[in-house]
Image (cartoon, helix red, strand yellow):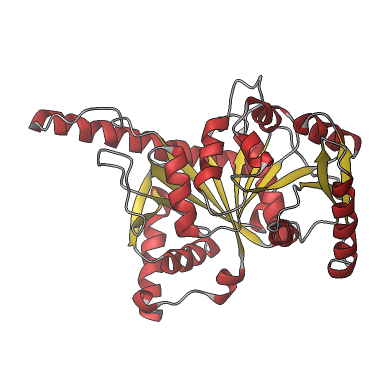
């Protein structure tokens, strides 16, 4: 009974949900956002969500909500300024074994960046591949199947929230605004749609290692999110860890595109809280003398416009781009690899190849991809 969820409020405005959630959590009431999940197909209404609490806290939550209705007109509530200024991390999870470490990673990043985390659990629609039979008995069966899937998913989410409390120190957990969202459907579709609604500063996704039994997201799912999302995506492998590092080394892979300046500014914003050394690296395959000239020009620009940051452009020779990235990363103790998502760029094209998928899924270095 304690781990059952009870619906307290149906929400159609994000600012109302954020306001009520923060008031509830200040009183020790943990909140969960879900959709009903009782219709066939993976489509949900992004403008409607249910705010739920554990059954044991429902009475306290209802009393607090009634008091809020007396003090505020929730229907006309505007966005809280402090909330609007807070950075946002969208954290899709599959509740796998290695996911707790991913959450610890995300929480540590959020704390450094004064960011909130929306932990998004996408559970499978058990009827997604069923053909509609349009009979009373069939529709009844479908509804029961969906209710059962929804019930199991809610219980899994609640239990996961308890596991997070066990492994994350209380002082760290209290310092971060973390909330839970549960939706039904195909992960890549739901994640992209949720991002459009939430407008995160970054989507943080965990990848599986080649030999990991309990995986997070497969390379194809991650690739589809990157393909269709309009937000930066940070792909974090199982053993990535910045803990204990006074300074991180970042490699930004460049092919001398005009978008590099925009991506570099985004990179600096995301890693603002970290002491860092950034290498803008171009992998030179053809020993082209013009490339060195471009590198020299970029270093002059960096010295002029980014003098407060530790950034330098480097030309690195290799007979293979992926091999060159790996070699440079290993020899310079790189903690993050980054590049822009330009469909005509060699770096973006590589993402769909088995070679780059090997980098994403096996290596211990997070990869940050920017939309352009």
Residue 122, above or below 44: above
The residue nearer to you, when weighing 132 against 35, is: 132
Count the labels in the image.
0
Residue 76 horizontal/vertical position (percent): 37, 78
Q: Is residue 360 left or right of residue 32?
A: right
Q: Position of residue 11 (x, y in %)?
A: 35, 62
Quarter occupied by residue 352 = top right
Residue occupying image coordinates x 90% and y 63%? 300
Task: Identify the residue at image location x=71%, y=50%.
Answer: 108
Q: Residue at x 73, y 62 (%)?
A: 265
Q: Does 291 appear above or below 267? A: above
Side (left or right) of 88 relative to 306 = left
Q: Which is nearer the eye, 2 or 10?
A: 10
Q: Is residue 170 in view?
A: no
Query: Residue 48 appears at what percent x and percent y?
Result: 33, 58
Between 39 and 291, which is closer to the camera in this rendering?
A: 291
Image quadrant in which the N terminus is located: top left
Identify the residue shown where x is 84% and y is 66%. 306
On screen, residue 239 above or below 92? above
The image quadrant of residue 151 is: top left
Q: Is residue 371 visible?
A: yes
Q: Quadrant of the C terminus?
A: bottom right
Who is closer to the viewer here, 354 or 270? 354
Whether residue 93 sits left or right of residue 346 in the image: it is left
Give residue 160's position: percent from left, percent from top: 53, 39
């Amino acid at each position: 009974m304690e781990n059952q969820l009870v619906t307290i409020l149906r929400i159609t405005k994000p600012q109302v949900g954020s306001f009520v959630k923060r008031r509830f959590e200040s009183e020790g009431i943990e909140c969960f956002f879900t959709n009903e999940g009782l219709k066939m197909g993976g489509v949900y209404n992004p403008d409607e969500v249910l705010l739920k609490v554990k059954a044991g806290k429902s009475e306290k939550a209802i009393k607090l909500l009634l008091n809020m209705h007396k003090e505020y007109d929730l229907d006309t509530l505007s966005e809280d300024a402090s909330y609007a200024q807070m950075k946002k991390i969208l954290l899709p999870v599959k509740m796998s074994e290695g996911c707790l470490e991913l959450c610890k990673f995300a929480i540590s990043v959020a704390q450094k960046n004064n960011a909130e985390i929306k932990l998004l659990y996408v559970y499978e629609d058990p009827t997604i591949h069923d053909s509609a039979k349009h009979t009373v008995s069939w529709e009844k069966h479908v509804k029961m199947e969906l209710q059962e899937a929804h019930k199991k998913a809610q219980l899994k989410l609640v239990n996961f929230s308890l596991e997070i409390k066990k492994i994350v120190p209380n002082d760290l957990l209290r310092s971060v605004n973390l909330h839970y969202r549960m939706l039904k459907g195909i992960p890549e579709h739901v994640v992209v749609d949720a991002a459009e609604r939430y407008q995160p500063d970054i989507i943080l996704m965990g990848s599986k290692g080649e030999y990991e039994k309990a995986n997070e997201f497969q390379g194809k799912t991650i690739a589809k999110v990157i393909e269709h999302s309009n937000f930066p995506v940070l792909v974090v492998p199982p053993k990535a860890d910045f803990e204990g590092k006074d300074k991180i080394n970042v490699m930004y892979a460049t092919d001398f595109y005009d978008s590099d300046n925009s991506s570099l500014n985004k990179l600096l914003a995301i890693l603002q809280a970290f002491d860092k050394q950034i290498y803008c690296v171009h992998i030179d395959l053809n020993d082209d003398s013009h490339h060195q000239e471009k590198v020299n020009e970029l270093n002059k620009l960096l010295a002029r416009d980014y003098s407060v940051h530790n950034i330098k452009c480097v030309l690195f020779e290799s007979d293979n781009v992926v091999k060159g990235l790996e070699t440079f990363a290993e020899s310079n103790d790189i903690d993050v690899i980054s590049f822009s998502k330009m469909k005509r760029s060699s770096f973006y094209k590589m993402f769909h190849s088995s070679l780059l998928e090997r980098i994403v899924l096996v290596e211990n270095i997070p990869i940050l991809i920017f939309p352009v």
